[in-house]
Image (cartoon, helix red, strand yellow):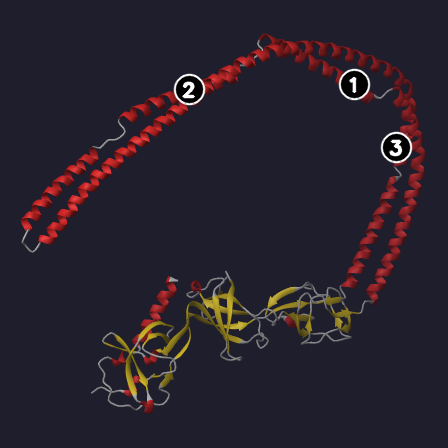
């Protein structure tokens, strides 16, 4: 905003300087040259940076990802389309044949896979049944995991119960751990001591709540001043300064009275605050004392409860150890018996296991058949994708602005077949079809490095397109390039992209425009040309043209200027005509 104001001030000074020719001149003739008059109008006065711009409509270039012959065109250049509309397609006969071939190959692979699964399942089923039978006999005689786990669990339980018994015996000797409560009691007693100290300090301060030394000094000074002003008043009675001396005397007396009143109020406030502080300190002390007594009672109760609980815990721990010893002995006996039975059945199980493992090796044929099915599925998917790629649909709502192929023409697969949006239609000739988004209008302008600091994203822009007329289209700055460009003359510029607030069907891609990047704007103001304004003795004037071309020299007050026109704050009315060449309408005498 400050830069805009400085720019406006410079332009205003420049415009007014152009009118300084009239200082000291006198009107001697009323003849006006041709084209020397202009009407005063109302409008928006804009101060900002201007630059040439070019309309760059957003377009989407489309190509085929596969090769073929164009079989059908559904649109023509200039047609309006909606998103998803089919635009053109290739002859898909060859791609349809590829799909049928891929489906047949997939069906064969699936049949081979089904046969491999059946053969494998039949062979494996027989061996698995034999293994299950021998494993059942082996499991009935001995389950290694279950028996070992039972012994390990019983041993672990015994060890755990023995540790619990040792801890219970230790707790019975000293059933209560006073570490935490002793610390809490110590903290509570320390807080009580602190609260007692605070109470003593508050009571002491209540005896002497206020130090009036500073006030007494100020009152003494005020009394001296009053005495001085009183004497000065008596001396001035009957003199010219009597009123002033009396006023100074009354002010000194009022100041002394206010000081004494402030002293009384300060004393009262200090006494009240000291009393409140003492009451608070007493309340805090009583609260801390109650907390100490309550904590001592809680500790005594906890010690009694802990002693009773330790007796019960010791008895329960001894019984738990006895039960754990019995469980361990039983588990060890069961393990020994199971091992004896296991030795008899282990040989039969090992023979069945070897046979089953040999049968499992046949799964390699199933794996190969399954891989073949997946390979055929991928080939079918690829063929179906290629058939789908013989069609181009519109990715946006818009208008067809370029269609480079006709029915029956050959098309090669494009390495840049994916939809790509760009600004401007200059690159559309390399695409099969180009769709333009008419809902948005963009312009690009190259701004020099000296002016780019005055442009920012979101800034308002006024756009005038020569081929359309004087209409001004509002817009906003949407992007500023970070990378500079340097032309052959060494001038560095940055590309700024502007988006119009609303589309317009009359605007075409590539049209030239004048872009004004608004820094300051005064709306609906009275404006006069700079050439009509001149200075005389520091005052701004214009010549108003009346009836029969009579000139009236009139004082005006001016505001903002854009270098061509100036805002008129007073002195003129809308519709009046002023001379834009006053130097030719008057001469020096």
**Separation of marks 1 and 3 at Cα, in angstroms:** 30 Å
- On the rendered structure, is 552 left or right of 375? left
Q: Which of the two residues, 131 or 181, is positioned nearer the viewer here?
A: 181
**Separation of marks 3 and 2 at Cα, in angstroms:** 78 Å
Tell me which residue sits at (91%, 32%) in the image: 128
Q: Residues within 10 Å of mark 2 (few under 14, many from 20)?
A: some
- On the rendered structure, is 387 left or right of 189? right
- Pick the quarter of the image with the N terminus: bottom left
* Numbered-mark total: 3
> Which residue is labeled 1 in the image?
150
Question: Where residue 177 appears, x then y in whole percent?
Answer: 55, 14
- Pick the quarter of the image with the C terminus: bottom left
Most extreme residue toward the top, as rendered?
A: 173
- Residue 18 in which image quadrant: bottom left
Q: Earlier in the sequence, mark 1 or mark 3?
A: 1
> Which residue is labeled 2 in the image?
190
Label 1 SS: helix
């Amino acid at each position: 905003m400050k830069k805009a104001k400085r720019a406006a001030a410079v332009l205003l000074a420049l415009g007014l300087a152009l009118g300084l020719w009239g200082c000291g001149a006198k009107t001697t003739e009323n003849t006006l040259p041709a084209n020397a008059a202009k009407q005063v109008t109302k409008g928006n006065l804009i101060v900002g940076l201007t630059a040439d711009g070019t309309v760059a409509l957003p377009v989407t270039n489309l190509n085929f990802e596969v090769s073929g012959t164009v079989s059908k065109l559904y649109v023509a250049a200039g047609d309006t389309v909606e998103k998803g509309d089919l635009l053109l397609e290739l002859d898909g006969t060859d791609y349809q044949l590829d799909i049928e071939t891929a489906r047949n190959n997939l069906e064969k692979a699936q049949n081979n896979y089904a046969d491999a699964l059946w053969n494998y399942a039949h062979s494996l089923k027989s061996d698995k049944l034999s293994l299950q039978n021998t494993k059942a006999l082996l499991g009935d005689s001995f389950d290694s995991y279950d028996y070992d786990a039972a012994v390990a669990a019983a041993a672990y339980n015994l060890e755990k119960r023995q540790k619990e018994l040792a801890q219970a015996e230790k707790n019975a000797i000293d059933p209560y751990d006073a570490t935490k409560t002793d610390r809490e009691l110590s903290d509570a007693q320390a807080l009580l001591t602190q609260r007692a100290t605070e109470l003593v300090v508050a009571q002491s301060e209540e005896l002497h709540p206020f130090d009036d030394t500073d006030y007494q000094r100020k009152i003494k000074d005020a009394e001296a001043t009053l005495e001085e002003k009183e004497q000065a008043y008596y001396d001035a009675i009957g003199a010219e300064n009597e009123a002033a001396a009396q006023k100074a005397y009354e002010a000194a007396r009022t100041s002394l009275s206010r000081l004494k009143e402030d002293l009384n109020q300060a004393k009262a406030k200090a006494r009240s605050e000291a009393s409140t502080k003492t009451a608070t300190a007493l309340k805090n002390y009583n609260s801390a004392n109650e907390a100490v007594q309550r904590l001592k009672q809680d500790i005594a109760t906890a010690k009694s409860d802990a002693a009773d609980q330790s007796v019960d815990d010791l008895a329960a721990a001894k019984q738990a150890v006895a039960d754990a010893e019995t469980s361990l002995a039983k588990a060890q006996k069961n393990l020994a018996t199971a091992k004896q039975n296991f030795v008899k059945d282990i040989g039969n199980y090992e023979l069945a296991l070897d046979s089953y493992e040999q049968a499992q090796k046949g799964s390699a044929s199933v794996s190969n058949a399954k891989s073949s099915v997946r390979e055929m599925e991928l080939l079918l998917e690829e063929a179906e994708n290629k058939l789908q790629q013989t069609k181009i649909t519109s990715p946006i709502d818009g208008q067809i602005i370029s269609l480079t192929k006709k029915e029956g023409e050959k098309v090669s697969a494009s390495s840049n077949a994916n939809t790509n949006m760009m600004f401007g239609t200059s690159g559309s000739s390399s695409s099969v079809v180009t769709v333009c988004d008419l809902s948005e209008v963009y312009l690009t302008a190259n701004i020099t490095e000296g002016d780019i600091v005055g442009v920012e994203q979101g800034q308002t822009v006024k756009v005038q397109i020569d081929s359309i007329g004087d209409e001004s289209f509002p817009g906003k700055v949407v992007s500023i390039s970070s990378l500079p460009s340097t032309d052959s003359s060494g001038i560095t510029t940055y590309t700024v992209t502007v988006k119009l607030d609303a589309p317009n069907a009359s605007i075409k891609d590539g049209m030239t425009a004048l872009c004004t990047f608004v820094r300051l704007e005064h709306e609906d103001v009275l404006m006069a040309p700079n050439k009509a304004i001149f200075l005389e003795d520091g005052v701004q004037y214009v010549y108003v043209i009346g009836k029969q071309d009579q000139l009236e020299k009139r004082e005006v007050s001016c505001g903002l200027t854009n270098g061509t026109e100036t805002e008129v704050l007073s002195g003129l009315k809308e519709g009046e005509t002023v001379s834009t060449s006053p130097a030719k309408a008057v001469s020096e005498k």
